[in-house]
Amino acid sequence: MKLTLSTPLLLGSGRGERQVAAAEFWTSYRVTVRAPDELILGVRLPLAPRRSVRFRKVGTRRAQAISKVVMALAYREDAGVWRDVRVALGSVAATPIRVPRTERVLEGAAPRNTTADHAAATIAQEITPIDDVRSTAEYRRAVTARILHRMLRDEGDW
Ligand SMILES: Cc1cc2nc3c(=O)[nH]c(=O)nc-3n(C[C@H](O)[C@H](O)[C@H](O)COP(=O)(O)OP(=O)(O)OC[C@H]3O[C@@H](n4cnc5c(N)ncnc54)[C@H](O)[C@@H]3O)c2cc1C
């Protein structure tokens, strides 16, 4: 998933077309700014040179299972440190979210053990999951932190 919540969505109706940043599209649980007569015509994905993107979905089964946690991580490596870090999540808040505090921990840092520990602790505090039929808030916090930690370990090769 390359959607990082600053990505523009293109909406269209008989009244014309407009773009809305993904972060502004979802206003609350199952509520969007899409008008009843509008369709989503497209998603514009800006090409970001040298950007790496990682994605992980956790569900009850490997496929055709609604997500308990879904995470996308994007960054650009620059002389051993990460720049332009984006972390976007689904199913851990009422809308898809970015986690700016966690992004700030990773921005300008190297994917080392200490960075991973700090980022994992931060993201567990930053998300706002609830218990529902799919999962519990406690499980989602723990798993979200471990997914991010594991992504950093894989990227740091340690
Ligand atoms: C049957 C089914 C199968 C799917 N299979 C796949 C698949 O195989 N692969 C795949 O990539 N995608 C799959 N998807 C899609 C994927 O599950 C969704 O794209 C993803 O879950 C969307 O995330 P979301 O955060 O937008 O919404 P949701 O996942 O619906 O998350 C919304 C969350 O908001 C929470 N919430 C509600 N109110 C509040 C509140 N007040 N405060 C905090 N939290 C709140 C709910 O607990 C819920 O977890 C499937 C979807 C369905 C329905």
Image (cartoon, rainbow, N blue to C red):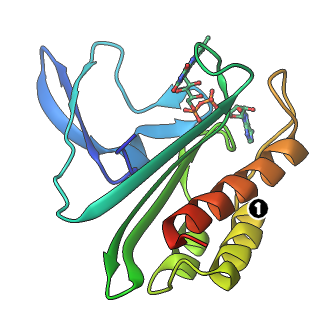
In which quadrant of this rendering is ligand 1 seen? top right
Asked whether mark 1 lies closer than 8 Å to ligand 1, one says: no
* Image-quadrant location for residue 44: top left
Q: Is residue 116 above or below residue 8?
A: below
Q: How many marks?
A: 1
**Location of residue 155 in the rendering, given as x and y in whole percent from the top left corner:** 50, 66
State the image quarter where residue 118 is shown.
bottom right
Q: Is 128 placed left or right of 70 in the picture?
A: right
Specify few, some or many for label 1: CA neighbours under 10 Å numbering under 14, 14-19, or 20 or more. Answer: many
Q: Is residue 114 above or below residue 129?
A: below
Left or right? Give the position of 48 relative to 32: left
x 16%, y 53%: residue: 47
Q: Nearer the viewer, residue 130 or 124?
A: 124
Quadrant of the image containing the N terminus = top left
Q: Position of residue 138 (x, y in %)?
A: 89, 47
Q: Circle 1 sits in a helix, a strand or a loop, which is it?
A: helix
Classify residue 51 as left or right of residue 34.
Answer: left
Amino acid at pointer 1: Ala
- Residue 113, percent across and down? 68, 79
Q: Residue at x 60, y 81 (%)?
A: 112
Residue in the image at 12% along x and 14% along y: 14
Q: Which residue bears the numbered disc 1?
A: 124
Q: Position of residue 103 (x, y in %)?
A: 52, 71
Q: Is residue 35 left or right of residue 104?
A: left
